[in-house]
Image: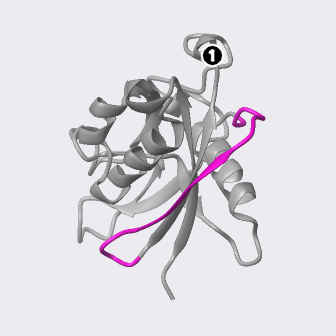
Amino acid sequence: MPVTSAGLLLHHGRGASAHVLIAHMGGPFWARKDERAWSVPKGVVEPGEDVEAAARREFREELGVPPPDLPTVDLGAFRYTSGKVVHVLAVEVPAALVGSPDDPACPDLTTRPGISTAQVEWPPRSGRRLAVPEVDRAAWFPVEQARSLLVAGQQPVLDALVAATDP
């Protein structure tokens, strides 16, 4: 059975002019990568867990702050070539959130208490285990710039967002 994850895609603006909040994957493998090294904040849906509840929990765990308590729009489920399925919900936030004290964007998430970590073997095949943040930073990008940054399996999420919010 494929793994199912859920994520929240915060955005301000609508259609192709929207800006989205995405997160850079943490750890030494991703440290020097930018293109295809970003993701919608997301994580595994636990058995019996509601998709929206999982998406909100994972947002809080990965970014260290609660997601805005605003309505969601279901953008759909997106299947990776690996078989993994990512269910993405969009949350439209006011543009005034960007740069405010409540902005979830952060140039260094490792400074926020309570962010989730993962165990990785580094260097590969060394037997040495490191605890690394699941994501190390989060930032706002215009949709078209985000397209080149997101992992390939999540790029269709941007098309779904543009279609769902096109004025």
Q: Position of residue 118 (x, y in %)?
A: 50, 57
- The figure's colour scheme reads one colour
Q: Residue at x 48, y 82 (%)?
A: 2
- Residue 46 horizontal/vertical position (percent): 69, 72
- Residue at the image point whose x is 68% and y is 63% from the top: 51
17 or 51, nearer to the observer? 17
- Residue 8: image location, x then y, percent: 59, 46
Residue drawn at the location 55% of the way across and 11% of the way down: 99
Is residue 69 inside the magenta stretch?
yes
The amino acid beneath tag 1 is Leu
- In the image, residue 57 sits, relative to residue 38, either above or below, namely below
Q: Can you name the residue that lies furthest to the bottom here?
A: 1
Taking the spot 44% from the left edge, 26% from the top edge, the residue there is 19
Residue located beneath label 1 in the image:
97
Above or below residue 93? Residue 42 is below
Q: Secondary structure at mark 1?
A: helix
In the picture provided, is 89 more to the left or to the right than 78? right
Residue 153 drawn above or below residue 149: below
SS majority, magenta: loop
Residue 127 or 58: which is nearer the viewer?
Answer: 58
Left/right placement of residue 12 relative to residue 55 reads left
163 with respect to 27 (left or right)? right
80 is within the stretch colored magenta: yes
- Magenta region, residue range: 66-83
Q: Is residue 135 visible?
A: no
